[in-house]
Image (cartoon, rainbow, N blue to C red):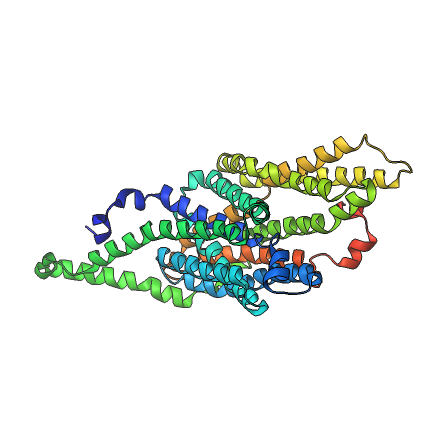
Amino acid sequence: MTNGSDGLGYKWRSSKIFIISTVTVGLFCEAFLYAFIVPILAYMVETRLKQDPSRIQGLTAELLSLHGFVAMISAPVIAHLADKVPNRKVPLLMAISVSLVGTLLVAWCPSVYVLFAGRVIQGISGSATWIIGFTTLADNIDRQKFGSVMGTVTSFIQAGITTGPAISGALLELSGYWQAWSVPLTLLSLDFGARLLMIDCNEIDTSDSTERLLPSKKDDTLTPDSHSSNSKTQTAESEPTVEYKASRNFYSTILTDPRTLTGLLNTLVFSLILSAFDTTLPTQLRTAFGWGSLRVGSALLALQIPPLFLNPIAGWMRDRFDLRHLTFAGWCLLGILLWLLGVVASDHSLSVSPRTDTLPILFATILGIGVASSFVRGADALQLVVVTEQMQAENPNAFGPHGSQSRHLFLLFLVFYLYSISSQNKQIPLIPREFEQKMDIFWINH
């Protein structure tokens, strides 16, 4: 019996439901924190930092893109180290501790330098939380339910991204500055407590394996035949180590696998579409329909609401139907809707007098794009997890004794980090700005 089994509440603390819930809350917190600063940055710049209000827009873009840049730079190191240790609890505790420090620095912000330092720390902790968190989920979710559970997790992440700015802006106006920051600090503290209570199953397995390797009284009375058998077993167990040393480099192996490249391409193309929406849809709606910020915001919100409810359903369908066919159908539907959106917007912008008959079609198309995105988003993560497990099943020690799940998932997040930097920094576009200026939304959607 291991020491962990003697602990109070061992059964529920080591249960997969508790571990998955704890990690999900952590991912929600990171998504919540990412854009939480945007609505209250004006107050921070003018009141706390005593800066010129004209710097608000520039600082917002710099802080958001800095978060993605730092996360992207630190991610490969974090993924490499995460694959070296079997235990996920300690790295997760370290990540949230660093996140608490970074959040306190950002909230305190006595100077611009401290504000940027806090954002850098948040970027490092966020990268660790995303990579180690998703690796922990991959370790604990049953493969028969992986799609549905990951769909639910994705909905929580999207809810964090959506509610973070809304809550910070509302609390700043209704209650005050520190009352607004009390929400993310409370969430991080609660998640820290949950991670402290969590018992990592990998830690238990490692402890059990260590006990089995220790000599027992029965070993002192081995017969000559059993000594010979034991010698053969030890020789066989040492072979994977030699095989690991002779294995190819991880990235050269993974990046030449067509299944991995397909999953990464899925993420890249979807990120390009999101980037195109961020840069062209608001401008086109203002130009073609004369919409203000409220209507443009509601149109963008229509893209985010459907996935909140449909991600678990799409994941459930991935568990029961062929992943390739379902993703292909999602892309086909998304392509048709993008074409239809381009036709509606272009036709309206070319008309002489304002038209209102196309508005229902426009909103329905945007909602449809949100629905179709649920069947595209998330397929890449499932694809990479399946590829990793198949490779490790063929050669368990090919990429080390603890696998390569973290490094594999890092490649997926790398594309997202690039999108994050590009969407906030006009100097690093995924789509050339000159192209966007010359071509309207109809041609971009084509």
Q: Against 98, is 287 above or below?
A: above
For residue 180, side relative to residue 342 (left or right):
left
Coordinates of residue 275 in the picture (x, y in percent): 68, 52
Q: Quadrant of the C terminus?
A: top right
Coordinates of residue 410 in the picture (x, y in percent): 51, 58
Task: Tell me the quarter of the picture where residue 222 sits.
Answer: bottom left
> Image point 46% across, 59% down: which residue?
99
For residue 123, side relative to residue 334 (left or right):
left
Q: Is residue 183 visible?
A: yes
The number of callouts visible is 0
Q: Against 340, is 387 above or below?
A: below
- Name the one closer to the observer, 253 or 144: 144
Task: Tell me the quarter of the picture where residue 330 sits.
Answer: top right
- Name the one closer to the observer, 367 or 270: 367
> Image point 41% across, 50% down: which residue?
191
Coordinates of residue 48 in the picture (x, y in percent): 58, 62
Coordinates of residue 333 in the picture (x, y in percent): 67, 37
Q: Against 355, is 136 above or below?
A: below
- Name the one closer to the observer, 407 or 125: 125
> Image point 62% across, 41% down: which residue?
304
Q: Against 328, is 58 above or below?
A: below
> Image point 45% across, 58% down: which residue?
100
Q: Is residue 253 visible?
A: no
Extreme-bottom residue of the structure: 113
- Name the one closer to the observer, 125 or 277: 125
